[in-house]
Image (tube, rainbow, N blue to C red):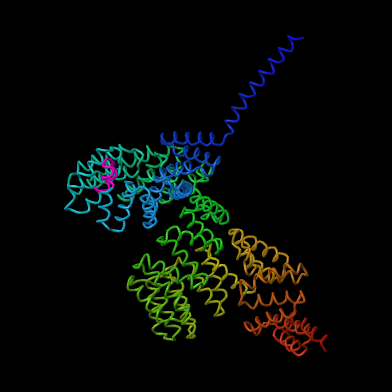
Amino acid sequence: MKKKLVITALRISTVLAASLVLGSTFGCHRDPNVQKQKYLESGKRYASEGKYKEASIQFSNALKVDHNFAEAHYQLAQAYLKTGAMMPAYAELMRTVDLDPTNTKARIDLGDLLLAGGQPDRAAQQANTVLATQANNADAHALLSSIAASKSDRTTALNEIQQALAIDPSKSSYHAALGMLQSGDPATSPSAEEQLRKAVELDSRNVSAHLLLSSLLEKKGDLQGALTQANAAVTADPRSPVARGSLVGVYLRQGDKAKAEATVRQAADELSDNAEATQMPRLFYSQTGQDSRAEATYADLVSKHPKSAPLRITYARVLIASHNLPKARSVVADLVKSDANDPEVAVLNGMFLLNDGKTNEAVDVLQKASKSYPDNIQAKLWLARAAASKGDVAIAEQSYRDATRLNPKNLEAQNGLAGIAIAKQDFNLLAQVADATIAIAPQYATPYVWRGMSEQSQNLNEKADADYKQALKLDPRNADAFLQLGEIQLTQKHIPEATKLLDQALLNNPNSARALSLLVSLDLFAKQPAKAVARIQDHIAQYPNNSEFYDQLSQVQLATGDAGAALDAASKAMQINPRDNAAVMAYTQAQLAKGDPAKAISVWLQWTQAHPTDAQAFALLGTLEEAQGDKEKAAADYKKSLQIQPEQPVATNNLAYLMIENGQNIDVALSLAQTARRLLPNSASTADTLGWAYYQKASYLSARDVLEQGLKTAPENAAIHYHLGMTYNKLADRTNATLHLRKAASLAPNSQIAKDAQKALTSLT
């Protein structure tokens, strides 16, 4: 019995001992301080091997354990800096100094980033904060030197870098900085060479010093020395695209295209994971006028590195530039399968989707990329284009605004935002864009035209005239300036002057449909329709591939009663440009004039099948079907329109009216009618719909007010008179009720409105 007890006790003791050991081990694994430190050390090992992506993952893991781990924030910032991800690096450095204000290295790095980002004063704050506690911090003095140099304060820059050298004469980068400052003055260039040679002697891996020395030697005619230093820069950092690019430049300036080409190909081959390096052959061929060689070069590089996303992305762009779209489409399709989250891949995918008419898909892809990579300006620009194509002005405008925020000097973004402003007739926005663009590009003529248009909208014709003339001074052939000057003369009824200016606008831009339209309007105003038709036909003879000219011809022919010719012109416009909805509109009007609404409906059915994301087309199709009495199909098309564009004004208004007439949910109908009125506040139709919705809700005073507003816009609208008469009847105002009901009956004899009005009048009497 005792033996059994002893054995049992031993077993219990063993189990307890094992439990204590295991508990200690598991406790160690659960200790967050130990865990985060392991992630940090692992990240540092990866970073020391140049594996910055893996290092970033480990530093991020450490921050998941402790999001206030200052050292992990700093190391993550370093990894981002090594990969060129400046914005994330900036965020991590800001977080580092917030958590650990004593981290002077982080402050210096942050100052360098701020200076690179064009914020020298904020950079100086970081340097001065360091000097406040460490007066002999050499890096802080070096940073102040760079800041002074950025402000062209050479004296201060020299003093500060010399202070840095006095504190630490063994720092290669300080000698390089002093050499760069001295190289700007011929009197001190010998000293500059001495400083730069000292820099590379102290640190043979100082790429900047090698490149500066190479440039200095090239200027003094030592071509071999320049080449030697450029090669040394590549040896110092084989992964530096800047070093390789500088070597290419030296070869080109020495007339050795063969070695320059070999260098760019080698860079793309050896640095196939680096976006900057993989673009070097494309840029080289473009700069040397050998674009035709790019496609074969990239085909070869991609075959060697089939998994390299940067190479395949550049290859796709080369194929697009050479109009080899089928092959480009294939390359992009493969990229979408393997690298769909890459913003450059998303942009390429969005481009093809947009080109294929898949506007909704393009917007979705580009929105996702824009959200995931908020600092990618190309994603913003392409999202803006896709949204504008879809008709979503709000997204387009915001995307262009985001692009201008990322780079205020991006003229494409400013142009896009100006186009939105013009389309919306938002002249305040147009003036803002004009002023911003003039500030960054004062020699660019177009923003003066924008500003003039804004001034013209306020009847400030003298100021507008001055801006248009400034545009012409900068660009004597600016057709838009001539066009706008012509419009000013038209408003002042100076017809000969206007005609001369519009003729000049059309001469400078033969595809200006607006200039031709105004000249045609002058012909019609002069009661010379034959001259108007002849003018358009003459212009078409010279420029036969502009569908807008056929649109205008169709409209004029329709106005003169020649529906057959109008139909032919509209058909030709549709043939030239199947995407010209104005042509389809002209065709519709011609068919209706000929009394054949079925063909008008048929062409819009075809259009909506080819353009399934065209909200306006579905709204128009619904309108035509409603006019034919097919209210069920009309309602379905209005709903499709609103699925694509939730605030499509015509569909919103017409669906609301149909719901009221069919006795459907009046609250939904009222909400739709209110939306339509907000979108089209000056429309008699939206006033009528909203007023009738209020009537159905027994809100008779509201109905009266909005219907009276509509009547001011369209005093001869029978429906508004009928609805207003019914409303006054509910308000016990028999005099006004009788007046409007009689007016409705007289305006639309033999119509259902007339019958309803007569019936109401009978009940009144």
Task: Residue 607 in the image: state x and y as whole percent.
Answer: 59, 62
Task: Residue 742 in the image: state x and y as whole percent.
Answer: 74, 88
- In the image, 74 versus 745, the foreground residue is 74
Task: Residue 525 in the image: state x and y as whole percent.
Answer: 49, 84
Q: Quadrant of residue 587?
A: bottom right
- In the image, 4 versus 114, the foreground residue is 4
Task: Residue 460 in the image: state x and y as whole percent.
Answer: 44, 81
| Residue lying farthest to the bottom in this orientation | 735
Q: Can residue 172 be found in the magenta stretch?
A: yes
Magenta stretch: give its range. 164-179
Quadrant including the C terminus: bottom right
Classify residue 243 as left or right of residue 659. left
Classify residue 600 as left or right of residue 169. right
* Predominant secondary structure, magenta span: helix
Classify residue 255 as left or right of residue 520. left
Residue at the image position 54 percent from the left and 34 percent from the top: 35
Q: Can residue 513 be found in the magenta stretch?
A: no
Residue at the image position 50 percent from the left and 39 percent from the top: 57
